[in-house]
Image (cartoon, helix red, strand yellow):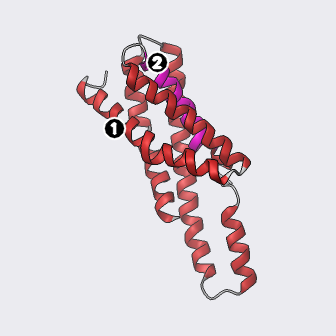
Amino acid sequence: MRIAAVCLLVSGIIVGLPAIALRARLLPSAASAVTWAAVIAVVSGVATATHGLSSLVGTDRLAQLYQGAGAATHAAIVIGQKLPSAVDPGGLATFGLAGLAALIFGAALRPGRPRLGTLGVVLGIDMVLLFIADSIGSTALVLVTGGLASVVLGPIWWVSIGRLLLAEGGG
């Protein structure tokens, strides 16, 4: 849980930089859409970082309470860990808004970079589905969409965006 919280914190902090650079690169082709996507990405990044920090601090507090506690406290802590984040209920920023930003950026990239654009669209749809799955409590769908977003699609997307921005000077 701590590793996941740290990943949320770090990714939320750094996502604004490539989002703004990508917006600058795409501005002539789809000005209002990519500006909106950049705003969504920055806002979701801040909320994601807040979500991660809150989870990290909360996990440490609960771990301290868990040690030496009775069965009732153990049960309460287990149930508390399963509740949605008070900072980001249902992963709205972490999954929903971030997915919407990836979807918009992907659509804007499709004319000039069809494969990269399609990857962004697929990642965006996957993350929106992850938000829906998390909101309705579908563990199986969370595992499938979350696995795709965090282990396959997300890393390929961000590495590809980084390569694009570095190769073309960021805009």
Q: Give the crowd class for mark 1: few <14, some 14-19, many >=20 residues within 10 Å.
A: few
The image shows residue 55, relative to residue 165, as above or below, that is below
Span highlighted in magenta in the image: 92-110
* Residue 149 position in % (x across, y down): 49, 43
Mark 2–mark 1 distance (CA, rounded to whole Å): 18 Å
Give, as a three-letter code, the residue at label 2. Answer: Ala
Q: Nearer the viewer, residue 85 or 120?
A: 120
At mark 2, the secondary structure is helix
Q: Residue at x 68, y 54 (%)?
A: 86
Dominant secondary structure (helix, strand or loop) of the stretch shown in magenta? helix
**To which quarter of the image does residue 29 belong?**
top left
Q: Residue at x 56, y 47 (%)?
A: 144
Q: Give the crowd class for mark 2: few <14, some 14-19, many >=20 residues within 10 Å.
A: many
Residue 159, numbered label: 1
At mark 1, the secondary structure is helix
Residue 108, numbered label: 2
